[in-house]
Image (cartoon, rainbow, N blue to C red):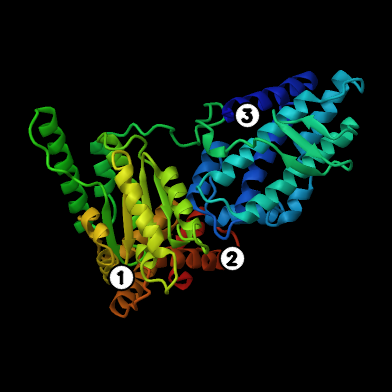
Amino acid sequence: MKTDLPALINKSLSICEKYDDRHENDGQLSEKLKKDMLNLLVFLTSAKDMRTMQDLRFINKLMGTQFNIISIRDYAVMNNLTDIDYAKKVPLSIIECLKEERDVVGFSMPFYKDTREVYKMLKELGYYMIALDGKVIDKELEWFNLYTNNVIKYILKEESVDYLTFDMVGAGVKIDAGGVLLEEADAEPAKEIGIFPENVAQAAPKPEDESTIEELLNEVNKLIGLDGVKADVNNLVNLIRVQKIRQNRGLKVPNVGMHLVFTGNPGTGKTTIARQIARIYKTLGMLSKGHLVETSRAGMVAGYMGQTAAKVESVVKEALGGVLFIDEAYTLSNGADGDFGQEAIDTLLKEMEDKRLDFAVIVAGYPEPMEEFLSSNPGLRSRFNRTIHFEDYSAKELVTIFEKMCADNQYKLSDAAKEHLTKYFEQRVKNKTSDFANAREVRNYFEETVTRQANRILTLNNVDNDTIITIEKEDL
């Protein structure tokens, strides 16, 4: 069953507006609900090691906020959303809605339907936020389960429910005599949710990518640096397009494999390009879905005989219709004796053959280890016959990446700061070690910088907007 989150949000807001109209209280309950929605979203980001730009974009578009990395952290601190204790508090909109509903239906009503609808929406919103980046963290689930469990117990207590099973969200929910959640059946995956309605804000991604091939190539060509990669991608697309023309005219068409090898150091944009390749393949009619599934050795190799093949088959099933991106793929072939990496390779090769019409694989890693990986099995070399190499970024390109991060988060560099930044990255590139992380290093440097800038800002008096957004030399 597919959960319709947009309808749930609209329905919950309508419920609150109904009670607001009853008292002519200028939308107080509606505003409390929006506040609880925002707090829940920010609370769940606090469970992560690091908030992402995807988190910020989603929250800002949905709730109409203008958070950046620093301001969302400050909001979380000011509203006590930084640890699990927030999950122990019942949302004010739930308390107020139940009170309003009781005033209308009285104590004779065994269930408070409106309150349950509001809870249902908050629950599905939380599921969506957790699954937004495709990586579910145990800590997020722990915090969110405590949050929903606490709300359930509150509602049951107010309803004086003393039996073991009830229907809260369209599925059986088992609780103990004290109202503690034991099991919830048929939980709806948040990734199934579609686009939000206009009155809430269209924050969710489009379920269907309708970009043209020209638009996709333009996105690639606009990326900073990567000139050789851009040329390779454009060449690949041109080859496929001409092959399509030949096919339509009944001419012979040489086989053009979809599988690719990406070589290069960390932070050079391999995952970004892999995601674009998946979308390009879909737009050109080579794949049915065009999504990207990321994995590594840990997602493919098990510790016991017979389990590795099942893990590989599972991840391939998830990627079917799209691209499977295997980072540090060389680790599959360089394990110790008795390791099951070779079983993973053998299973992968079989899956690539069996599902070759709607499945592509991109393997990535450092250049020399990847060459050894391809040489470890004749089947690998024959299937991965096209390599795209990702050069390290130059110092100028690293500065440009930093400036883009500033612009995306409403910061700017002073002239002195830019001069210092340029010299810094020139030295980093000149003296870089084997673990130099390119754009990832820029990201870490940026986050350290905005933290230092925030500490400096808080020591100043009468701070204007220009001061708040300007990064000075001493912040670097």
Q: Element under label 1?
A: helix
Q: Say which label, 2 or 1, has the lower sequence index.
A: 1
Q: CA distance from mark 2 to mark 1?
A: 51 Å
Amino acid of disc 2 = Leu
**In the image shown, does 39 or 383 lie closer to the viewer?**
383
Q: Which mark is residue 369?
A: 1
Q: Element under label 2?
A: loop
Specify whether residue 111 is in view: yes
Q: Residues within 10 Å of mark 1 (few under 14, many from 20)?
A: some
Q: Are marks 2 and 3 in contact (CB under 8 Å)?
A: no
User: Which residue is at 63% across, 36% downward?
Assistant: 124
User: Which residue is at 9% across, 28% downward?
Assistant: 249
In the rendering, at what x and y percent does residue 446 appear? Answer: 45, 64
Q: Is residue 57 above or below residue 381?
A: above
Q: Residues within 10 Å of mark 2 (few under 14, many from 20)?
A: few
Q: Is residue 7 above or below residue 325?
A: above
Q: Residue 150's image quarter? A: top right
Residue that label 3 marks: 9
Q: Element under label 3?
A: helix
Q: Say which label, 3 or 1, has the lower sequence index.
A: 3
Quarter of the image that includes the N terminus? top right
